[in-house]
Image: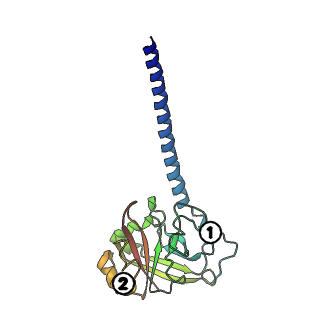
Amino acid sequence: MNMRKFWIKMNILYEKLMLFAFVAVLLIVIYGLYDSWYVFNNAKDDSYLKYKPVEGESIPEEVPITDDMVAWITLDDTNIDYPVMQGEDNSKYLNVNPYGEYALSGSIFLDSRNSGDFSDEYSILYGHHMEYGVMFGALDEYLNESYLRAHSSGTLLVGRKNVKTFRLKVFAVAKVNVFDEKVFFEPDSEDIGVLIQEYAKVYDDSVTKSRRILALSTCTEPVSQNRLIVFCYIY
């Protein structure tokens, strides 16, 4: 009888443990779904669009985007229409949005070694690769040559005072290892134009060249050393 009671108690304990484990797993799944939704919802937040600068004007002081904003990039007829931030290093805006708030989706940001007025011959922007073409997830489309040719125009609004407008023209897309210093970040060691043509998956040689090049870089997979880079001329 005692053994029977013992096994009954053990069965009850086992059922409680299984129920606890099931609830724990369910809570983890719910949290994972919520976390994914939260990250995506923040990444697709377009509230900042109302603060997009206008050529020749200064950005109003009351605009909540931080003073680290150096430009605004737009690629016509795509999801890419974002403020460009620049921190004292390349980690600041990985998980901070343009308002200076913590956000896993981060911001589009200019390499800290570049000049904030985009006067360098080679400048690099970084952005997270988000689902559904959000942030720099939209760059995937440029691996299709016909898409690249149809969506090659854009603008770069530079500065916070007396904003200047530069035209952008997409001319190439490549996949590059993140440790390739010729691209990240010693372009002076070799003609970057020749290097881009060598690496390019798609290359439009009909585009009029410019001495200034803008590279848009994003991850290709969640855990990978490869980066997808879309190259634009700045005019």
Secondary structure beneath label 1: helix
Quadrant of res 177 = bottom left
Measure the C-alpha gap from mark 1 to mark 2. Answer: 36 Å
Query: What kind of colouring is applied to the model shown?
Result: rainbow
Q: Residue furthest front?
A: 2
Residue under label 1, please give it. Answer: 50
Q: How crowded is mark 2: few (under 14 residues within 10 Å), some or many (20 or more)?
A: some
Q: In percent of the image, x 59 and y 75: which residue is there?
A: 69
> Which residue is denoted by mark 2 in the rendering?
192
Is 215 in front, or is 96? 96
Say which of 187 and 50 sits in front.
Answer: 187
Measured from the top left, where is residue 65 in percent x and y?
63, 70
**Camera-side residue: 227 or 130?**
227
Residue 208 appears in the picture as rendered: no
Q: Tag 2, which secondary structure?
A: helix
Closer to the eye: label 1 or 2: 2
> Looking at this view, is 185 or 11 the one in front?
11
